[in-house]
Amino acid sequence: MKISAYILTGIILLTIESSLLSLFPVEFFKPDIGMPFIIYTTFFLGPLPGFVTSIFISIFQEILSNAPHGSIIFTKISIFILANFLKSKLYIDSKYSFSCICGGSTIIESFLFLVLSVLSKGDTSNIMNVMFNAIPNAIFTGFVSIFIFSLLEYLNMKFLSKA
Amino acid sequence: MKNSIIIIIAVLVLAFSFFIFTNASFFVNTYSKAKGNIGEIAGPTLKLIGKPANLVGYLFDTYINLIDTKKENVELKKKLDILQLENQKISEFDKENKRLKSILKLAEQHPNKMIAARVIGEDIKNWFRCIIIDKGRDSGVTEKMPIITPKGLVGQAVEINKWHSKIMILNDTNSSVDVYVEGKNTRGILEGTGQTTLKLKYILKNDDTAIGDKLITSGKDSIYPKGLPTGIIITVNRNNSGIFADIDVMPFNNYKRLDEVLIIKKQ
């Protein structure tokens, strides 16, 4: 129940993001709205919800992006595996530490994408673009994560406490 | 034990996604089908969400600018706000009317050859430059169809779903167009950089190109028809090493400002 509510919320937010981005002249700061959902479910609900969320969010992100097939699934599942291993090492005590982890994961995702593109296809055309946007994206993802964390906590308290 | 099984499955999915990425045909076909089915819901959802989102955009463009006006009288301000909003709405309608007229004019010049579409979304990653339009397979859109506006070339359709399609913009790093410099016998390849400007490549340093020259499609890449305006040369650097000049081009269309586009049907 909780996982489906989180995935649905994530998908709706991603669709709104895609729709709103076509209206506002935002080019350098595109937050990864899917990342907070993956981190939240992996850290607080366990590996299975984290894995399911990673799959659904990454497929939906690929639908709304021109990214090569499989690339976002690869990076998001890698982030999930990494988060699962670091779960016992990192402690999320507030929305701010959550925000830092989401921002950090966004930077790691950018580098994973670059490594994947360069090593498997030898594609170097997008390196500058991805590197140039990695830090602004991470900052904005971290910023947005604060609100998403609060939203998920609110959903937990208000509607999902018995689920 | 349960955790280990999930991690093993995750690693298998990771391998699966790697094979999809490297274009292993079996994996790509399976994945494309699954993605296509899920993608069917994205188009209508985007259209549905696009309507209130348009309202938010409209309010952002209009009402937000009014926040700083002095609070003289609450009632008067309210009336003034309403009148101003209505007034701006009229000018907004006027702009839309002009835009749609120019689209219609272009479409009428080539009846049965063009499909008009509305932009309903944008790529959620800024690693790529892509827009989503509200016409898909049902409207006859197929891959590699050129997308234009009355100003010039926008890009090409790259992924088609039942109700929506993804358009790769000229600015995308994967985009390249065979172009001519208008009025001159110079031909080059216009490539996206992921930024606002494009790069015109393979133009020799002794070629007669200058700032302000307009570029048109050559029609030799078998994707874009001949003669479509693409952009204007904004810098020419002949002081770099090598035999080719370093040329920056500004595309005629700003993809962040696109509302409606035309899809050229392939014959």
Image (cartoon, coloured by chain):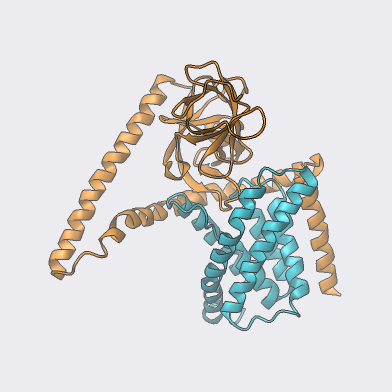
Counting every numbered tag in the picture gives 0
**Quarter that holds the N terminus of chain B:** bottom right
As drawn, is B138 to the left or to the right of B18? Answer: left
Q: Residue at x 43, y 21 (%)?
A: B111
Viewer-nearest residue: A48 or A25: A25
Q: Which hue belongs to chain A?
A: cyan
**Quarter that holds the C terminus of chain B:** top right
Please give the letter of the chain rendered in orange: B
Is residue A32 among the parts visible in the rendering?
Answer: no
Give the vertical position of B168 relative to A42 (above or below).
above
Q: Residue furthest right?
A: B1
Name the spot of residue B152 as percent of width and height, x first: 45, 29
Name the spot of residue B40 as percent of width and height, x first: 59, 46
Q: Residue furthest front?
A: B239
Q: Residue at x 32, y 40 (%)?
A: B96
Give the vertical position of A27 relative to B259 (above or below).
below
As drawn, is A24 to the left or to the right of A87? Answer: left
Q: Residue at x 57, y 29 (%)?
A: B145
Viewer-nearest residue: B56 or B125: B125
Name the spot of residue B156 as percent of width and height, x first: 57, 33
Name the spot of residue A100 as percent of width and height, x first: 61, 73
Q: Residue at x 54, y 82 (%)?
A: A157
As drawn, is A136 to the left or to the right of A118? Answer: left
Is residue B264 among the parts visible in the rendering?
Answer: yes
| Quadrant hosting residue B185 | top right
Viewer-nearest residue: A1 or A130: A130
